[in-house]
Amino acid sequence: RTVALIGGEFSGGQPKGGVERAPKMMRQAKIVDQVKALGYEVNDCGDHAFPSPDAANSSADPPAGIVKNPRTVGNACKQIYDIVQAAVKRDEIVYTIGGDHSLGLATVGGHAASRPNLCCIWVDAHADINTAETTGSGNMHGMPVSILLGLQKPQDIPGFEWFNPVMTTADIVYIGLRDLDEGERSIIRKFGMKAFTMHHVDKYGIGQVVQMALDHVNPKRDRPIHLSFDVDALDPAIAPSTGTTVRGGLTFREGHYICEAVYETGLLRGLDIMEVNPALGNDKEVADTIAIGCSLTRCALGETLL
Ligand code: DIR
Ligand code: MN
Ligand code: MN
Ligand code: MN
């Protein structure tokens, strides 16, 4: 099989610089060779940089309500969306290294646009399902899921008019949540969305949680899967270099187990490793977080299973 590698050098969905450098750092850590060593062809689609919102004239992209950099984020998402969609049409496994998680709209959305019946597992400390109404921060990395599912109308956010939602609240499942805004909670409840928080991971164990997650979005194990992994789902003790750490996260093994179990289904067709920020933390913390981005990737592609 062929893996299409896409670097999303983008930080405009949140305020902390540095997250745009993760694709290059993962390459320096030899992620391409690691994927090849697992027997995949790599179609390297390159790293894609975007004008940083601070550098751009802010009058060119004024906030929409309190939503920050909407056109900048929308433009980056459109470009990545097209690249992802083209890779999916070639039937490649789309593997995106972020960049902040606002690009999840582009990776999952671009994938779903050309892969009928796609489902998504969103691994994150956060639900990223704020709308323009509910967001408290105005940071778009907290909003991709709501636009992806059409809960936030794309036409109502400047820069997102091009986006066409094709997935529904039943096509996505969360694992790892522990930091939700009040508005996000009510959206999840209102639509009866399936969400496994850290409480569920404690209660049932990660094995049961992944099985229940798959039973929900993929009961017959016949739907292609997109795994969108925000490294802040992991405990900050093991993945400290990320912009919005929350204590009490997934252990090293729990994070890798999710990737292995998805690989084991034989249905993984898209993978995102998002929010690694090499500008945060000391050298060891940065190296550990980059290394975990690489090892999660390898597990999702089959390294650790017999
Ligand atoms: C918060 C934090 N819910 C927000 N979200 C984060 O800004 O909307 N997402 N950190 O990754
Ligand atoms: Mn996220
Ligand atoms: Mn995030
Ligand atoms: Mn997060």
Image: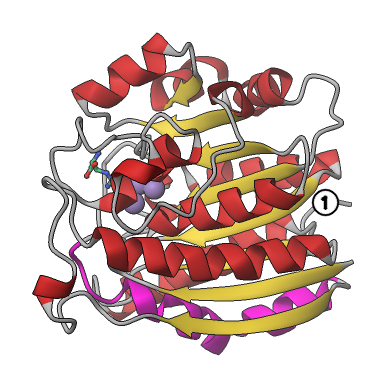
Q: What residue appears at the point 15 percent right and 77 percent down from the top-left corner?
A: 54
Q: What residue appears at the point 18 percent right and 49 percent down from the top-left corner?
A: 67
Question: Badge 1, how many Cα within 10 Å: few under 14, some, many 20+?
Answer: few
Q: Is residue 305 magenta?
A: no
Q: Is residue 283 left or right of residue 15?
A: right
Which residue matches tag 1?
305
Q: What residue appears at the point 62 percent right and 55 percent down from the top-left corner?
A: 110
Q: Where does residue 145 sit, x and y in percent of width and height?
A: 44, 39
Q: What residue appears at the point 53 percent right and 83 percent down from the top-left corner?
A: 47
Tell me, yes or no, if residue 236 can be seen here: no
Relative to 20, residue 143 above or below: above
Q: Is residue 137 left or right of residue 73?
A: left
Q: Is residue 20 magenta?
A: yes
Q: How is the image coloured?
A: secondary structure
Mark 1 is on which residue type? Answer: Leu
What secondary structure is the magenta-colored segment mainly? helix
Q: Is residue 144 left or right of residue 69?
A: right
Q: Relative to the observer, which residue lies in front, 35 or 76?
A: 76
Quarter location, residue 177: top left
Q: Where does residue 98 sit, x and y in percent of width and height?
A: 46, 67
Tell me, yes or no, if residue 20 can be seen here: yes
Chain part drawn in magenta: 15-38
Q: Is residue 94 left or right of residue 73?
A: right
Q: Where does residue 272 sit, x and y in percent of width and height?
A: 57, 58
Q: Relative to the observer, which residue lies in front, 74 or 265?
A: 74
Secondary structure at numbered mark 1: loop
